[in-house]
Image: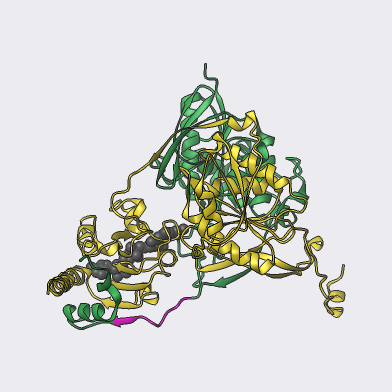
């Protein structure tokens, strides 16, 4: 093969349109815990509805559990056209192998494979999705923050069998390389195209009680070898206070709070509000000043409170991706050049040990006047 | 009762994102210039593997896939107590996604088998997928325990504590089994070992090094090149974009007295709407 020839004949041949067979269906694998559908499932239904509309296919949801009752109908309320229900005592709690068996068996019954299969990027979804993808030898993208449908032209001749113009690909978009880049990952050569999405990122549809959907029971054939792992006990740690993903107001502290005691001051500010919690950057979690459950960011939680106070947080990209969708962001930092100010809506350049007490003082004052007003 | 175990641990060399070298201003990594290190999560996996060896005796083999410099982390593993290192290095592996990587590694595992336990890091810091461990378990038809943060051996079974949302679960699994180890596993007893005598000795003595570190190709492990690298990867990174920063819209107060700045913020934001009554 000669390169110069290649260049002369650089009339690029029009790429042939290629369609990998599928039934255009988008399937969400639901997640339930103690019989309750988990929020990430509703988020996935919201994202999946959009994808199914763009593909002109149906949105389905597959749920595994025991006697899920009214929870199943909720999947329709939140957007599913059809719900496949695997009901069996052995499916009550998630376990890799039985769940894998039922899902693989079911997806194998399709004459044409579904176009897309999505799961939540939780400890369950990340345990299960790779096994299903590996079984079907299909592509899987982890921890996506955006999903879309669009065409893809594969022009890389290194792999001639893949050349072509593919319409209707799943765009699985995720942060990469420490999250200063977004990567669009595609796999149009095999169906289903699979992804997991980060909890807290996709937006559920408003529930619609009048939506109609079909509920379809599916077969469960668990094998002896699927019981090679047993769950002995499930322990939920009772979280005192409000979880950082549910709070309306977050008071987040970074290395600038200068020690575990600093969070006492932030707690006082949080106490001024109705539904508020403290939160933290990774650096203070690593320093052991505060437990991991408070961490916001790439390796912590994604939050979107109505108000986010960032106190003594520099605003590294790994932190910003976890909080940049918050309502109003207020940054307090000594350094006017701290990157946190690039995502903040309001900023105060100053020492948090002066600013936060002043905030508490003025808010308590405001509260008094409000109380007085209600008294009148 | 308990016979010596054959323990495998899968480790990967990644760019050191903490170091400045090789990290471009836009956050991309110049892999040629970047400092290299063992994926931090894999240190927990290695520690777990060495812990089993302490309990059962036997051997720990560290397995890695990557270009020749990845032998560095195999040396590091040996310094910490692993007995052997295997590096799967082959140009045809370039551009492997997780599925292709898992295929190649499962062939490497079969090549070095038998084994009772396989340990993987939870995820890598350069790929962040947490997929390769479970994909290998699927290929090998093994039970898996992902997000493992504690475990003990009970006869032919492993009893493990696995992280879940808002808590944890206790499980037990038959051996052989694959486990991915979370970074909430026991704190690392990890020392920097670059200069250690054992490693220095191996680095200088190719002959002895080749006895403990085996470099193998796809042909050696009888892997099908069609299922590796670009060809074997069902996904492709089609495009990368810089993350759009909103920027420039922040209303910053500076240089005034603290009470004025605070007052202004409280007057121009909805903060007071959320106060306790
Ligand atoms: C793979 C990877 C994943 C990561 N994941 C996360 C993640 O999930 N979440 C996360 O947060 N980070 C994460 N990080 C770490 C991140 O890169 C930063 O190191 C971290 O967010 C910095 O924390 P910080 O802002 O608290 O500390 P620093 O960067 O040290 O910032 C402290 C700030 O406090 C200010 N300050 C100091 N004293 C005062 C004072 N008295 N009053 C006001 N301001 C003051 C300083 O000006 C400075 O801006 C990750 C990093 C990597 C490589």
- In the image, residue B140 lies at what x, y percent? 66, 37
Dividing the picture into quadrants, the one containing residue A252 is bottom left
In this view, B156 is above or below B111: above
Q: Which quadrant does the C terminus of chain A fall into?
A: bottom left
Report the residue that reaches farthest toward the front: A210
Dividing the picture into quadrants, the one containing residue A285 is bottom left
Residue in the foreground of this view, choosing between A201 and A43 = A43
Dividing the picture into quadrants, the one containing residue A167 is bottom right
Residue A336 visible? The answer is: no
Residue in the foreground of this view, choosing between A183 and B187 = A183
- What residue appears at the point 54 percent right and 52 percent down from the top-left corner? A73
Taking the image as shown, residue B173 lies to the left or right of residue A277, namely right
In this view, A90 is above or below A51: above
- What residue appears at the point 57 percent right and 28 percent down from the top-left corner? B175
- In the image, residue A241 lies at what x, y percent? 28, 53
- What residue appears at the point 57 percent right and 33 percent down from the top-left corner? B177
The range drawn in magenta is: B245-252
- In the image, residue B180 lies at what x, y percent? 52, 42
Question: Which chain, by letter, is yellow?
Answer: A
Question: Which chain, by letter, is green?
Answer: B
Q: Which quadrant does the N terminus of chain A fall into?
A: bottom right
Membership of B247 in magenta stretch: yes
The picture quadrant for ligand 1 comes to: bottom left
Residue in the foreground of this view, choosing between A285 and A199 = A199
Taking the image as shown, residue A270 lies to the left or right of residue A188, namely left
What is the magenta segment's predominant secondary structure?
loop
- In the image, residue A57 lies at what x, y percent? 69, 63
Membership of A300 in magenta stretch: no
In this view, B268 is above or below A289: below
């Amino acid at each position: 093969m000669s390169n110069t020839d290649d260049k002369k004949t650089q009339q690029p041949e029009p790429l042939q349109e290629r369609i990998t067979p599928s039934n255009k269906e988008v399937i969400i694998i639901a997640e339930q815990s103690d019989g309750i559908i988990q929020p990430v499932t509703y988020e996935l239904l919201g994202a999946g509805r959009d994808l199914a509309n763009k593909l002109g296919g149906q949105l389905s949801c597959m749920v595994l559990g025991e006697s899920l009752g009214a929870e199943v109908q909720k999947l329709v309320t939140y957007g599913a056209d059809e719900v496949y229900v695997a009901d069996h005592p052995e499916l009550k709690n998630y376990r890799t192998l039985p769940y894998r068996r039922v899902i693989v068996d079911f997806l194998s019954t399709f004459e044409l494979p579904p176009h897309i299969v999505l799961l939540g990027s939780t400890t369950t979804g990340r345990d299960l999705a790779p096994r299903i993808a590996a079984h079907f030898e299909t592509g899987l993208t982890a921890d996506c923050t955006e999903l879309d449908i669009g065409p893809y032209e594969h022009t890389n001749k290194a792999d001639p069998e893949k050349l072509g113009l593919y319409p209707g690909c799943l765009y699985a978009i995720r942060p990469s390389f420490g999250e200063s880049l977004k990567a669009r990952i595609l796999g149009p050569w095999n169906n289903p195209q699979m992804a997991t999405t980060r909890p807290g990122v996709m937006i559920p549809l408003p529930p619609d009680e009048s939506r109609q959907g079909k509920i379809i029971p599916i077969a469960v054939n668990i094998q002896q070898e699927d019981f090679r792992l047993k769950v002995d006990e499930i322990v939920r740690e009772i979280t005192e206070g409000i979880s950082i993903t549910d709070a309306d107001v977050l008071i987040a502290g970074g290395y600038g709070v200068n020690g575990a005691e600093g969070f006492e001051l932030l707690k006082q500010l949080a106490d001024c509000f109705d539904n508020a919690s403290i939160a933290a950057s990774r650096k203070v979690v690593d320093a052991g000043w505060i437990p991991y459950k408070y961490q916001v960011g790439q390796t912590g939680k994604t939050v979107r409170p109505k108000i986010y106070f960032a106190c003594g947080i520099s605003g590294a990209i790994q932190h910003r991706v976890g909080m940049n969708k918050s309502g109003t962001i207020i940054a307090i930092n000594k350094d006017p050049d701290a990157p946190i100010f690039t995502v903040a809506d309001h900023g105060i350049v100053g020492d948090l040990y002066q600013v936060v007490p002043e905030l508490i003082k003025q808010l308590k004052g405001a509260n008094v006047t409000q109380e007085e007003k209600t008294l009148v | 009762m308990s016979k010596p175990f054959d323990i495998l641990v899968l480790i990967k060399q990644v760019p050191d994102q903490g170091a400045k070298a090789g990290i471009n201003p836009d956050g991309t990594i110049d892999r040629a210039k970047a400092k290299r290190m063992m994926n931090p999560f894999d240190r927990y996996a290695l520690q777990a593997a060495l812990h089993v060896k302490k309990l059962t005796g036997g051997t720990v083999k560290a397995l890695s896939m990557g270009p020749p410099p990845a032998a560095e982390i195999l040396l590091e593993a040996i310094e910490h107590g692993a007995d052997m290192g295997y590096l799967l290095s082959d140009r045809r592996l370039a551009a492997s996604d997780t599925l292709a990587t898992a295929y190649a590694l499962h062939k490497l595992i079969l090549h070095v088998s038998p084994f009772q336990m396989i340990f993987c890091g939870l995820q890598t810091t350069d790929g962040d997928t947490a997929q390769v461990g479970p994909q290998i378990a699927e290929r090998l038809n093994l039970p898996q325990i992902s997000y493992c943060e504690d475990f003990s051996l009970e006869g032919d079974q492993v009893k493990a504590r696995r992280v879940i949302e808002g808590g944890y679960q206790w499980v037990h699994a038959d051996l052989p089994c694959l486990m991915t180890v979370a970074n909430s596993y026991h704190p690392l007893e990890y020392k920097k070992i670059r200069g250690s005598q054992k490693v220095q000795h191996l680095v200088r003595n190719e002959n002895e090094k080749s006895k403990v570190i085996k470099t193998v190709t796809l042909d050696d492990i009888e892997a099908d090149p069609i299922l590796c690298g670009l060809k074997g990867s069902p996904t492709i990174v089609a495009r990368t974009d810089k993350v759009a920063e909103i920027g420039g819209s922040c209303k910053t107060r500076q240089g005034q007295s603290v009470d004025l700045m605070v007052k202004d913020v409280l007057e121009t934001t909805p903060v007071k709407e959320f106060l306790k009554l």
